[in-house]
Amino acid sequence: MSLGIVLLSATLNLNSHLPPLQLWQGQSEALMQQEGPLTTDFELSGGLESPNYEQTNEFLKRLVASNPTQFQSVKIGVSDQGRDINMLLAVEGSQFSPAMMKNNNKPTLLIQAGIHAGEIDGKDAMFMLLRDIATGKRRDILSKVNILFIPILNVDGHERSSEFNRINQRGPVTMGFRTNAKNLNLNRDYTKLDTPGVRSVLKVINDYAPALYVDVHVTDGADYQYDVTYGFNPSFASESPAISKVLEEQFTPIIDTKLAKSGHIPGPLVFVMDKRDLKKGLAGWVASPRFSNGWGDIKGLPTILVENHSLKPYKQRVLGTYVFIDGVIDALAQQHKALHSAVEAEKQSYPKELVVSRSYSQQPDYIPFKGIKYKSFESALSGHKEVKYLGEPINYEKLPVFWQKEIKTIVQVPEAFYIPPQYADLVDKLKLHGVEVEALPEGTSLAGLTQLTVDNHSFANSPFEGRFRVDATFKSNLLNEEVSLSGWTKVSTKQAYSELVTHLLHPVAPDSFFAWGDFHSIFQRTEYVENYALEPYARKMLKESPKLALAFDKKIREDKKFAKSDKQRLEWLYEKTPYYDKAYLKYPILMSYTGQ
């Protein structure tokens, strides 16, 4: 019995709980080879399996050996468990250095697979495409673009491999795990930078300055006809609308046409408002900067998120990814000047205010949608109506889609942020983000700076991505006295990545360093007061300040809870003494605003 038959039998057994499949045949099946130089492990398995970490690295070596003038493999990082994170460079004429690639008059495309290691379609698709370049079948590609390819970003999750990692996904037979060895999701790490994988990617972006960044995933959720869905933050909700318009108007038609001609059905990057009832509408998600595509949008780096449909067979998804990348290469080759112009325009945009969070609109838009018929039934297991997909196509002429159009939070953008030296680790993170920073010399001092004080706050009840996130409101205080800034770092918002600076450093932003918990120490007090010392001091203080005494009496009269609490009364008095911790609840990063 052949390996392919064994794997097919195992796959059918594993997928017996999933909705029925639509039969699929596409021209892209001709891309597969069964023998010959550089036949991939995916192809040898009949499109059912993906190679492990060791086999993946062996194939990288074979690619480089096949044509060292076009391919080079480099280590870009090391995982928590000590595995190398590798990247393949595919460039004409041994022009592998970042400087040479930036000056060879071709746009550079960065493609990333396996950020969620169970979603590994991009690895096998790109290995086929790179093989076709190596063997001369696709000699045209490197005449148009330079390619950077990361086959497995989450290498530790990749090796936590099992047949049972994804109950709602058709293949590969064995697949990696979503998170890394520390159980962190790399695609929630683009602002806080806790994972070596994402730190490695940002260094690659700084070094090579790609014209376009593609992050390949597999989605979960509803059943529908589309096998390749993809997208980016739409122009009406983008912080880089000029870039989004080029992707919408000049890239999407080229990519969609190529996919359709090869037998694939491209679809929009939307999710479902209610997974038990598709007819309630679609969720038009706008990614925040913790995600690859949201970070790219805020940074002004053109970024496309691919979400292949998890219920389609692995072979179909991988072949669709090959065709998708081929379409991206065509679009980038044809439209890179327009894209570059949009990027440069966004670098000159310095907004005075910034939307940092959004919510779903109450009123929907309507789009046609290629769905799959389903029925609802009462489940004795859940005690709730559940959905059963029937495997038959249904085309909705007008399905509601609720985009995150509603503006939830806007912040005023400072002219600059000032970071004290004890937070040098955040300065290092800003540099990794590509942000320009300025070390202030000894003797620097400024007046008119603004400091925010936490007014109300709440910590999350449970950790998220290894952090206890915090939500807070603030009071603003203008500091009229001069503040010594010797050894501090100035971060201007009048720079190419203005929006990214504000999202990272303004504490109101949901993906700021503050919100992720980098300033938890300001919520604790470490000097204490004894009542035997405070009571006589406060009595003397009230006697010497009639104004303060009147305020204390008024607080007692008007706040019954305060009046009955000895703790609150003494705390109020302690706050008015010069002994009180002046740094308590103070956001330590100062801000300056135009006109102050």
Image (cartoon, grey):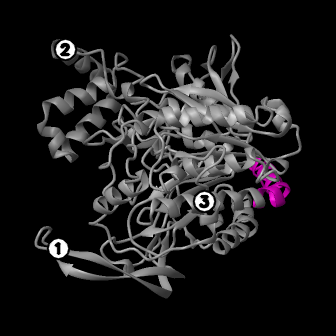
Label 2 SS: loop
Q: Earlier in the sequence, mark 3 or mark 2?
A: 3
Vertical position of residue 396 compared to residue 46: above or below: below
Q: Earlier in the sequence, mark 1 or mark 2?
A: 1
- Residue type, mark 2 in image: Glu
Q: Quadrant of residue 472?
A: top left
- Residue 530: image tag: 2
Horizontal side of 115 relative to 130 (left or right) equals: left
**Other-residue count near label 3 (Cα within 10 Å), few / some / many at <14 / 14–19 / ≥20:** many
- Residue type, mark 3 in image: Phe
Label 1 SS: loop
Horizontal side of 358 relative to 7 (left or right) equals: right
Q: Whole-percent x and y of residue 343?
A: 77, 51
Label 3 SS: loop
**Other-residue count near label 1 (Cα within 10 Å), few / some / many at <14 / 14–19 / ≥20:** few
- Residue 384: image tag: 1
**Other-residue count near label 2 (Cα within 10 Å), few / some / many at <14 / 14–19 / ≥20:** few
Q: Is residue 347 magenta?
A: yes
- Residue type, mark 1 in image: His
Q: Earlier in the sequence, mark 1 or mark 3?
A: 3
Identify the residue under disc 3.
232
- Residue 537: image tag: none
